[in-house]
Image (tube, rainbow, N blue to C red):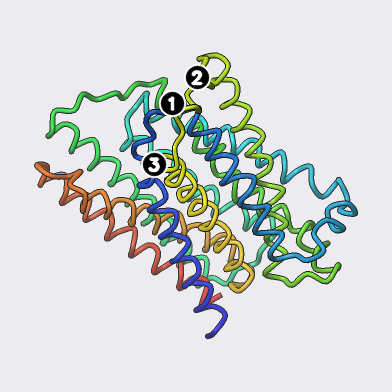
Amino acid sequence: MDPINLAFLLIIIGAVFQGIFAIFIKNTKPLRWENFWAIFSLIAYFFGPLIFALFQISNLSSILTTLPRDYIYLPLILGMIWGVGAITFGLCVVKIGISLTYSIILGLVTLIGSILPIFINKISLSSAAITYLSLGLLIVTFGIILSGYAGILKDKILKIKSKASLSGIILAVISGLFSSFLNLGFVTGNSISSFAILNGVSNTSATALVWLVVLFGGFITNFTYAIYLLKKNNSTNLYKKLSLKVFLPILTSGAFWFGGFALFGIATTKMGDLGSSVGWAILISLSIVISNMLGIKFGEWKGAKKALKFQLLSLGLIILGVILLSYSALVD
């Protein structure tokens, strides 16, 4: 298969993973949020990247011991900042509701996570690539905003009390800015992947080392916060009620979450200079489409026909934007 086609296929599969990982954790009873989040963080942010790196890099231990620390600091710190964004995402859902949270945060994540890598890597684009990239990002962002409006309209039709507040919206903007740092951490890890390649690791496998560093930063933030809540709420004893029936969905969810980004990382190596920008936008955009399609299938929009029309329009716009983004990589 042609490398660029393979890259698109990997990102589509990754988007499916990202779009469906949450359905496995809709019900985590009898655990509290912090019980679940501690386990999820261990699987998705620590063991997932570690196992992936061990499979991809045979001499991982020797590379880690000789990897210059200067290469690690920035991606690790950006990963920690992204971790704050992941935590505040959950707080935003409580403050302003799911629809508005997704609209604001994922809109910012798509835009910032796609545009900044171009400047960080000092990529020179053709005029055609700039046109398709800009238009694609604008359409995707508008689609995400429209999706948020559809969600708010649905809540109004179904008489679900609105939670929107100025403080919640400000927090969502901050969360969106911080959440985009995941891709920035991956992009600034070029020195890490270059070091791995110099030590005999293939180009595609080297991305595993970058994720190991970046997501470890996110693990530090998320796991620390979960441990803090476990102690504060005295909820550690709930682990006594942990069963295989509860653990397996969390394990699956964590594996799918990391799997999506692992495939994205591999795909970027096959897409040329625009890989980390276009690939990121496609991954996030398609994951939104897939998660919303699942929501429609599971009846979340039942009884809100008018809102559903807006939602379907938003998904169509996002798909159109994804097509334009894909074409920007091809013409470049």
**x, y (%) of residue 291?**
33, 51
Residue 235 is tagged as: 2
Q: Are circles 1 and 2 on residues that touch, CB within 8 Å? A: yes
Residue at image point 59% right, 36% down: 83
Residue type (three-letter) at the residue carrying disc 1: Arg
Residue type (three-letter) at the residue carrying disc 3: Ile
Residue 301 is tagged as: none
Q: Is residue 174 above or below residue 61?
A: above
Disc with the residue nearer the chain's start (2 vs 3)? 3
Q: Quadrant of residue 323?
A: bottom left
**x, y (%) of residue 322?**
40, 64
Name the residue carrying label 1: 32
Name the residue carrying label 3: 25
Badge 2 marks a residue whose secondary structure is loop
Q: Nearer the viewer, residue 227 or 146?
A: 227
Residue at image point 60% right, 41% down: 42
Q: Nearer the viewer, residue 48 or 207?
A: 48
**x, y (%) of residue 165?**
34, 21
Residue density around tag 2, few if under 14, some if 14–19, many if 20 or more, within 10 Å: some
Residue at image point 57% right, 37% down: 178
